[in-house]
Image (cartoon, rainbow, N blue to C red):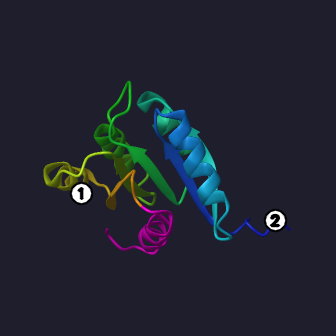
Amino acid sequence: MDHKENSMKIFIADDDALQRLTLRIALNQEKDMRVIGEDSDGLGILKKVRACIPDVALIDVDMPGLSGMDAIRTIRSALPQVKLLMLSNYSDDNLVQEALTTGADGYILKAVEHLELISILRAVYHGLKV
């Protein structure tokens, strides 16, 4: 049996291929996490998330086709059980508030340290808002 079979399933949505790769490598190294899907375009997010049903989705605020905010709103409405984290380069209180109001369970900066990212993902997975 794959030791990751019962681990936290994570979806990454970011138009930056290097960012997705970096996140995938970092998260898949954790014993209790595995990346099960990715997308680079906002328009494909809902279809891909529906296909794999992650526990947590990391969604970039700036996505082509459909903004991260709109993607969160759409996923929250269609799949309320999925935990949603807005991923951003911007440390802006207004964006944080908008993300949380839209339905995000948290807002994290792309520059976050590895251990802090892991801690935040685990907290959101267990129902905390960050």
| Residue at image mark 2 | 2
Pointer 1 residue: 100
Residue 36 point in image, percent of width and height:
64, 50
Q: Is residue 90 visible?
A: yes
Q: Residues within 10 Å of mark 1 (few under 14, many from 20)?
A: many
Q: Closest to the observer: 91 or 83? A: 91
Helix, strand or loop at mark 1: helix
**Could you classify mark 2 by the number of other residues whose Cα lies within 10 Å: few (under 14), some (14-19), or many (20 or more)?**
few
- At x 46%, y 64%, the residue is 117
The C terminus sits in image quarter: bottom left
Residue sitting farthest toward the right: 1
In the image, what residue type sits under mark 2? Asp
* The N terminus - image quarter: bottom right
Residue 127 x, y percent position in the rendering: 40, 73
Q: Residue at x 44, y 63 (%)?
A: 113
Expressed as whole percent of the image width and height from the top left, the position of residue 87 reads: 37, 49
The numbered mark, 2 or 1, whose residue comes first in the sequence reads 2
Whether residue 48 is visible: no
> In front: 88, or 38?
88
Label 1 is placed on what type of residue? Leu
Left/right placement of residue 78 relative to residue 36 reads left
In the image, the segment drawn in magenta is: 113-130
Distance between the alpha carbons at the discs numbered 2 and 1: 35 Å
Vertical side of 46 occupied by 53: above or below:
below
Query: Dot 2 lies on which element?
Result: loop
Please state which of residues 111 and 38 is positioned toward the viewer in this rendering. 111
Is 103 situated above or below 75?
Answer: below
| 113 sits left or right of 55 in the view | left
